[in-house]
């Protein structure tokens, strides 16, 4: 079967009435939670992860995909109307979109964000379907040393790409790798670091760690730095529809943003935040009205939002084909697969093609649902923004606790939720990225297993780790991955910072 046949097979799964309902629930929940102030896609997906426990794998993952895309869209509403980016990828949207909202053009800003997200998501999902089979064929020839090199590449990229310091990223990674040692040794069957606690023999639960670090840690952090006055929500005035001039100024940025976002999302180069900065810089250079940037240029919303959503689809390429999460949200999605005993990678395409292609096809449907759902419901999302912060984050703590208890009713699990939540608060307080901890916990056991297999085959010869051309290439890419995100971030953010400086002048 070719890619088209597999995609048609996936559509037959995704168009099942039950799956359509799961997708609709996913995009609605994802948007509703993602639109809340200070909550980005990673926190949205982590918070709603326990909701999918009781479903079958296909329904759960399709709902998860809807939550993912809904959370991505919801962040743009918060950035435009409240000037509160839920994540770094929404900073550029806030820069231009909030200026448009203050000038009474919040409706067109939200519209170009929604339509740009739809266009980018549609094109990027089709590219995902075309690229994935090729990557799978290459990955099927990997041996233990090649997989270990791939894990090293993942470790280096998430450590260097998140946060402003590679050192802090590596420290976070080693915290995750240390937590991955807890439990039963996969090769010898010996208990490690369980301290006599039976619940730790299965290791640290990934979902508990993710919910604690992202949801509980964020709630504590917001409570700790809360100011007396809340941010003011800007009302949407006039029509939400775009004028003909808005359309003519937006369609090229949508396509350029997609072209920039998808490959950067598919590569281990730092995810959507870098894509949005580069898209903003590209739009400013290409615009015939560069003087409008910093004062509400619609291109500054259209391009970065398209890049953001194209990058989101791009991150699914390494996640689905190699089991390699390159963003915080992808790491939590990997945990979602693992809760059903599924490991994304080339073998999943071979053993369970209906599930994988059903998930890919559901992304197309989720995109269309988001467009149809969100433009008429802008007023509802605006009202959600007025929820007082204390109520909001108290609700997050309650929801995170109930979700953890429902999934693993154990005092030990609840204690770990509290401990890791406080750890997440401390990491945010001192600027340590959260994603490398989750990635270290998820990929650590696999990296250890592949390393020990490779050394067993070579009878302890360490040179075997670079003897394979594939392994040597991946390790060389890992070395480059320490440098490339710094260069890309410096180029992309340089344009934004220079714009901010010129605005102040």
Image (tube, helix red, strand yellow):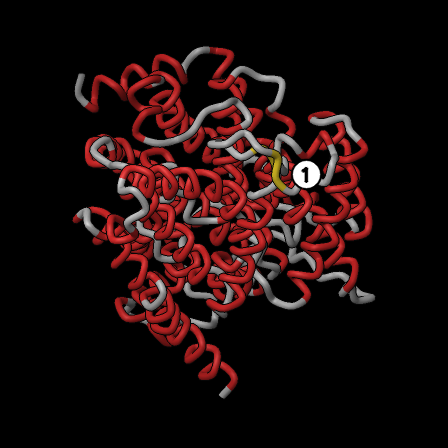
- Is residue 141 depicted above or below 290 in this figure? above
Of 467 and 436, the residue lying toward us: 467
Image quarter in which the N terminus is found = top left
- Is residue 297 depicted above or below 187 in this figure? below
Q: Which quadrant holds residue 456?
A: top left
**Residue occupied by mark 1:** 194
Q: Residue at the spot x=58%, y=54% of the render?
A: 175
In the image: residue 253, left or right of residue 63: left
Q: Residue at the spot x=47%, y=18% of the render?
A: 58
Q: Residue 14: image x %, image y %?
A: 41, 18
Q: Which quadrant holds residue 489?
A: bottom left
Q: Residue 464: image x %, image y %?
A: 24, 48
Q: Residue 141: image x %, image y %?
A: 20, 33
Q: Is residue 442 visible?
A: yes
Q: Secondary structure at mark 1?
A: loop
- Is residue 368 depicted above or below 451 in this figure? above
């Amino acid at each position: 079967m070719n890619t088209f046949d597999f995609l048609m097979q996936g559509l037959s799964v995704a168009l099942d009435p039950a799956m359509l309902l799961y997708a609709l629930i996913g995009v609605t929940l994802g948007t509703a939670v993602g639109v809340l102030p200070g909550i980005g896609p990673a926190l949205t997906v982590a918070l709603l992860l326990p909701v999918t426990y009781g479903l079958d794998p296909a329904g759960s993952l399709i709902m998860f995909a809807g939550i993912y895309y809904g959370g991505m869209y919801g962040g743009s509403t918060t950035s435009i109307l409240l000037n509160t980016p839920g994540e770094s990828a929404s900073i550029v949207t806030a820069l231009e979109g909030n200026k448009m909202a203050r000038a009474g053009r919040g409706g067109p800003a939200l519209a170009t964000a929604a339509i740009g997200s739809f266009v980018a998501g549609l094109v990027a999902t089709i590219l995902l379907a075309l690229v994935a089979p090729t990557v799978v064929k290459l990955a099927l020839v990997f041996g233990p040393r090649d997989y270990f090199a791939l894990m090293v590449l993942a470790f280096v990229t998430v450590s260097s790409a998140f946060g402003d310091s590679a050192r802090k990223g590596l420290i976070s990674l080693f915290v995750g790798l240390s937590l991955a040692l807890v439990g039963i040794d996969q090769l010898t069957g010996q208990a490690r670091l369980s301290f006599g606690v039976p619940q730790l023999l299965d290791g640290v639960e990934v979902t508990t760690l993710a919910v604690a670090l992202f949801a509980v840690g964020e709630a504590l952090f917001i409570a700790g730095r809360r100011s007396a006055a809340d941010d003011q929500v800007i009302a949407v005035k006039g029509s939400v529809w775009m004028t003909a001039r808005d359309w003519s100024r937006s369609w090229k940025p949508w396509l350029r943003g997609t072209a920039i976002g998808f490959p950067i999302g598919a590569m281990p180069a730092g995810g959507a935040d870098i894509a949005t900065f580069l898209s903003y810089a590209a739009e400013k250079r290409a615009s015939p009205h560069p003087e409008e940037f910093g004062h509400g240029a619609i291109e500054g919303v259209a391009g970065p939002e398209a890049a953001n959503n194209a990058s989101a689809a791009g991150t699914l390429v390494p996640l689905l084909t190699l089991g390699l999460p390159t963003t915080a949200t992808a790491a939590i999605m990997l945990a979602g697969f693992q809760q059903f005993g599924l490991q994304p990678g080339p073998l999943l395409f071979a053993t369970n093609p209906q599930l994988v292609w059903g998930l890919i096809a559901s992304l197309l449907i989720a995109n269309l649902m988001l467009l149809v759902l969100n433009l008429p419901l802008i007023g509802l999302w605006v009202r959600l923004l007025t929820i007082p912060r204390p109520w909001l984050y108290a609700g997050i703590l309650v929801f995170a606790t109930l979700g953890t208890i429902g999934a693993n009713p154990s005092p030990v699990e609840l204690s770990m939720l509290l401990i890791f939540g406080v750890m997440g608060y401390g990491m945010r307080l001192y600027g340590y990225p959260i994603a490398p901890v989750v990635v270290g916990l998820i990929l650590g056991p696999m990296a250890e297993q592949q390393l020990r297999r490779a050394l067993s085959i070579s009878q302890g010869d360490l040179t075997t780790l670079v003897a394979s051309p594939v392994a040597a290439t991946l390790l060389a890419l890992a070395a480059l991955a320490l440098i490339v995100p710094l260069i890309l971030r410096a180029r992309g953010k340089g344009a934004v910072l220079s714009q901010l400086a010129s605005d102040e002048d």
